[in-house]
Image (spheres, rainbow, N blue to C red):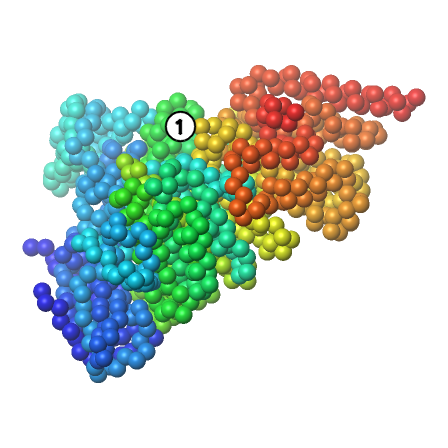
Amino acid sequence: MPLIDHVGVDRIYGPFVLLKGTPDVGFGELAQIRMKNGDHRLGQVVLNGEDATLVQVFSGTSDLVPETTAVRFLGRPLEMKLSPALIGRVFSGLGEPRDDCGPVYSAYSKDVNGSPLNPMARVYPRNFIQTGISAIDVLVTLIRGQKLPIFSGNGLPHNKLAVQIANQSQLVGEENFAVVFAGIGVKRDDAAYFMEELFEKGRTKNMVVFLNLADDPVIERIATPRFALTVGEYLAFELNMHVLVIMTDITNYCEALREIGVAKGEVPSRKGYPGYMYSDLASLYERAGVLKGIQGSLTQIPILTMPNDDITHPIPDLTGFITEGQIVLSRELDSRGIYPPIDVLASLSRLMKDGIGKGYTREDHPDLASQLYASYSRVQDVRALASVIGEDELSQIDISYMDFGKSFENTFIKQSYDEDRDISESLDIGWKLLKMLPRNELTRISKEEADARLK
Amino acid sequence: MEKQGIIIMTNGPVVKARGIREFAMHEMVYVGEMRLMGEIIRIDEDEATIQVYEDTQGLKAGEPVFGRGEPLSIALGPGLLGNIFDGVGRPLGALYEKGGIFIPRGIKVPEIDTEKTWELEPEVKVGDIATSGTVIATIKETPLVSHKVMVPPGLEGEFTFVLPKGTFKADVTVAKVRDSRGQEIEIPMVQRWPVRVPRPCRQHLTPKEPLITGQRVIDGFFPIAKGGVAAIPGGFGTGKTVTQHQLAKWSEATVVVYIGCGERGNEMTDVLEEFPELEDPRSGRPLMERTILVANTSNMPVAAREASIYTGITMAEYYRDMGYDVAVMADSTSRWAEALREISGRMEEIPAEEGFPAYLPSRLAEFYERAGRVVTLNGDMGSVTIIGAVSPPGGDFTEPVTRHTKRFVRCFWALDKSLANARHFPAINWVDSYSEYVGEVEDWFSLNVDTGWSELRKRAKDLLAEDERIQQVVRLVGEDVLPDSERLIAFTSYLIKNGYLQQGAFGPDSFSPPSKGFAILSLIMHFYDRAFALIRQGVPFSLLRGGDAVANLVHLKELSSEELEAQLPKIREKLDAFMEKTGSERLAARGR
C-alpha cells in the first residue's frame, strides 16, 4: 500500500500533534512529520480513534506549522536495523548514526519495544561475574544476566564505578564480550568520559553507543534505552555474546516520562510521575537474563541519581522493586575519601544466594558475607552510641566493633580505581577483619567454619 | 454467526468499541484481526470499554471485536498441578513450545493439555443421586494429590452414565446426569469457571487449626490459621519474595498456588527450577507436585496482571472443593492494585487516594474474603489460606494499599528494613507484627506441641517488648550502666533474636517444625530463669554469659529437629551444670 501524506494537523500541544480524519492507523505506529522546508521528524501514535489520531513527536513540536505540516504513517513500529556491523558504532538517542560511518544497512530489523520473555524460556542466572571490587564481589555479588542498578547521587563517582565494573568484569573470552552504552540525557563531558574510558582504555572493542545528550530533545529519551536494549538482546540472544548494558541516567528517563504524562493530561500518581511508571520501567529492566539453549547473556547496570539522595523517591523506589538488588553509593563514605563509596548495608544482590559458595565462588563465601553484614550493621549501632557517650565510655566489645568498622571501610571497601582483586583475595581480607572481633560475637558462622578460618 | 463490534479507539491496554449492544458486561472478547484477549469493563450506550490482556500495538480503528459469550473463565481439571500459567490461565509451557522465547500476541493454546492421558477411577455408578460437588471419579494427578472430578455447582439429578475405570484423555465426558426437568447433562473432565465469581461452598467455619509454615517467627509468634488471611508488607529488599517462597515451600498445605503478580521473571524461573528439586518434608516427594504457578511478570501486559489474582484464587478454590487445604501466595498485591489504577486512569475515572480508584478497598475485600475454612458442597472440609505480599512505596505503611489491606487481614507480618540491612531474616518485626489467630490456634498447639506453648510464647514476647524499652536506654548511655537484671533481659533477647527468630532460607534450618522451635525457645527461657535466680542471689551477670553452653544457645537452630531432639537432654544438662558451677563457685567465694 502506498504511504499517504496527510497534510495539515489540527492541534499542536506539548510534544503532541493531533490529526483528524485519519483512519487505518495502528496504535504505536511510527509516523514521519514533514515540514515545508523538507526537514522531517519522527513520531509515534499514542492514541488512535476513528476520527482522530494523536502523535507524539520525538524531537518536539517547535516550528511546526499546522497548515503545511504533513504526516506520513509508516505502517511499522519504531524499529532498529540489526546486523553485526553495529559493533563499534555510535548512534543518536533515536538510533540514527552519530558517527561518520553512514547508515546501517540490513534487511533485518526489530521493534524496539521488544516482547515479554516467557519465564519458561529463562534459565535462572547463577554464574558469578568477578568485578575485582571486594565490596561487590563478596557482599553484592554480580551475576551474569542480572539487572543490578547503581543508586547514586549528584557528584558521586557512579560513572567511574560503572567503568571499573565494565573494564574489570571477567567474562569468558573478550571476543564474546560486548558493552552497550545508553546515555540518556547525559552531559557531554560524561558521554566523553565513558567513550574514552571504555573505547580506548577498556578491554573490549565490542561497543555500541546510543547517546541522547542533555540538550537533545527530551521525548527522545523514552526511546533511547529501548534502542540500546534491542541491540543488546540481538547481540546476546542472536549472536551469543555476553552483553553488559549500561544505562545512565534513569532519572532523566523518568523525567521525560512525567513530562509526556502531564502533557497528555493523565492522572498522576506519586510526585507527578505517571501511574504506569512501574510497568514502564519494568519493560526496560526485565529485558535482561539468560535463556535456555542460548550461549549469550544480557546483564544490565542502570545508573540513577537519587533526587536529594532520597532512596524512597519514586524513581529509586520503583526501580528497587523491579531490579535484582541495588548498589547504593554513600555520600558520607565519599566525603571521607573512600572509593568506591559503596554503602554495603543498603546494597543488595538478590541473585547472589544461588551464585556463590561451593562450586561457584568459595564454600565459605555465604557465611562470611552474612557475618560481615551482621557485624558491620552492629558497627553502626556502636557508632551511634559513641556519638552520644563518647568513645572512651564504650565497653571492650564495642571498642573492638569500632576498630573493626574502621578497618572494614579502609581495607575492604576501599580500593583503588584500577585495583582488580581476585575473589579469594577479597574473601581472605574479610576473614582477616573478623579476627578483630571476639569469637562469641560471630553468630552467623558455624563452629567448624570458625575453627578452620579463624585460627 | 459470531457477535461483532468494531474498534473506535485504542489507548494502551484500553480499547473502545462500538456496536456491542448484544455483548454482556465482563464478557470475554477477541479484539482485532489478531484476536487479542480482552474483557468488557464498561458499557456506555452503544460503546464498550475493553481491557486487553495483550499488547495492543498496531490495532486500528475499524477492526472487529468478537464476543466469546462467557465471562473471563479458566479451565479447571487435572494437569494444573506442577504447571505455570499466565495471568489469564494460558499455560506458559505450551506457549513456549508454540511461540518461542518471547510471548507472541494472539496465540491460542489449549489451557489444559488434552493429549495427556489420566487413570480414571469412578466413585459412583449409574442410578446414583448426583448433587453439586458429588465426586464422580478420582484421578491420581500427582503422587501427592488425588484429583476429584466433581459435579459442577448447581447441578442435581441422577447419573445416567458414568465412564468406567480406564485411561482417558482430558477431553472426555466423565458422566451424564438427568436433572429434575428430565434433561440429560454431560459433565466433562475439564470444567470452566468464571474467575471473578467465588466458587460456592455449603458453610464457612471459623479457623481452628494453624497452617504450619516451618518458620519459627510465624509458627511460634504470629501463627496463621488454615483458612486465614495474612499480609506481608515490606519495602524493596526486605525479603518479601524470599519469605513467600519459604512459605510456598514448607507450608503444610496439600496444594500451593503461587501467584507472581507483576514481579520479576527470574523469580518465577527460580521456583520452576528449584521446586522440582526440593522435597516436601512430610512426604519426601518433589514440591512441584503440589504447586501451581500463575505468572504475570512485570513486563507482561498490565490488564492480565489485574486478572492473575482471580485466576490463582479460582484454581485454589477448585482444589479446596476437593477437600484439601490450599495456600495461596500472592506476590505482590500492590502490583495488582497498581494495575487497577492504571486501567482506571485510562478510563478517566475520578481517582481517590494517590490516583487509586475509589473501589480499591472493596476489590481488596472481595479478594481476601475468598479465603476461609469451609464445608464444601459435598460435605468435605477444605480451606483456602491467602498470604498476600504488599509492596508499599518507600516502605511507608500508611499508603493506601497497605492501609486498606490491614482492614481485611487478621495477620500482619511487618517486614523491617533495618533487620534486613543487618541480614536478619526473615525480617519480620516482632513489635509491629500481629496475629489475631493466636487465641483460635492455641488449643491445637497445646495438644500437639506442648501444653506450655501459650505461656512460653507470651513470656518470650513480653521479654522482647521489655528489651525494646531497654534498648532505647542502651542507645543513649550504653549497656554497661544497666543493672544486671536488665542486662540479662537484653542478652536473653539477643539469644531469642539470633537463636530463635532468625532462620536461614537454605540448609537444614530452612524448615523448622514447631517442636524444634519450642525446644529452642524453652531452653533459652530456661537459661533466663536460672540466670535470673542466680543474679538475685548476687552472682554477677558477666560470669553467666561467658560459658560455651550459653553461647551454644544461638547455634541450636543449626541442628536438624531429630538431632536436636536426641541431644536435648545433654544440652540442657550441660547448661544446668555450667549455671550450677558458676553460681556455687561465686557464692562460695563470697561466703568466705
Q: Nearer the viewer, residue A448 or B193?
A: A448
Q: Which residue is mark 1?
A: B278
Name the residue furthest left.
B1
State the SS at label 1.
loop
- B389 horizontally vs B315: left or right: right
Chain under disc 1: B
Q: Residues within 10 Å of mark 1 (few under 14, many from 20)?
A: some
Q: Nearer the viewer, residue B209 or A245?
A: A245
Based on the displayed image, in which of its 4 quarters is residue B45 positioned?
bottom left
Q: Residue at x 63, y 17 (%)?
A: B569
- B156 horizontally vs B380: left or right: left
Name the residue furthest right.
B592
Residue B90 placement (x, y as % from top left): 24, 43
| Res. A132 visible in picture | yes
Residue B225 placement (x, y as % from top left): 47, 37
Residue B448 placement (x, y as % from top left): 52, 25
User: From the image, which quarter does the C terminus of chain A lie in?
Assistant: top right
Q: Is residue B48 above or below residue B324?
A: below
Residue A366 placement (x, y as % from top left): 52, 33
Under mark 1, the amino acid is Leu
Q: Residue at x 66, y 41 (%)?
A: A407
Q: How many marks?
A: 1
| Res. B313 visible in picture | no
User: From the image, which quarter does the N terminus of chain A lie in?
Assistant: bottom left
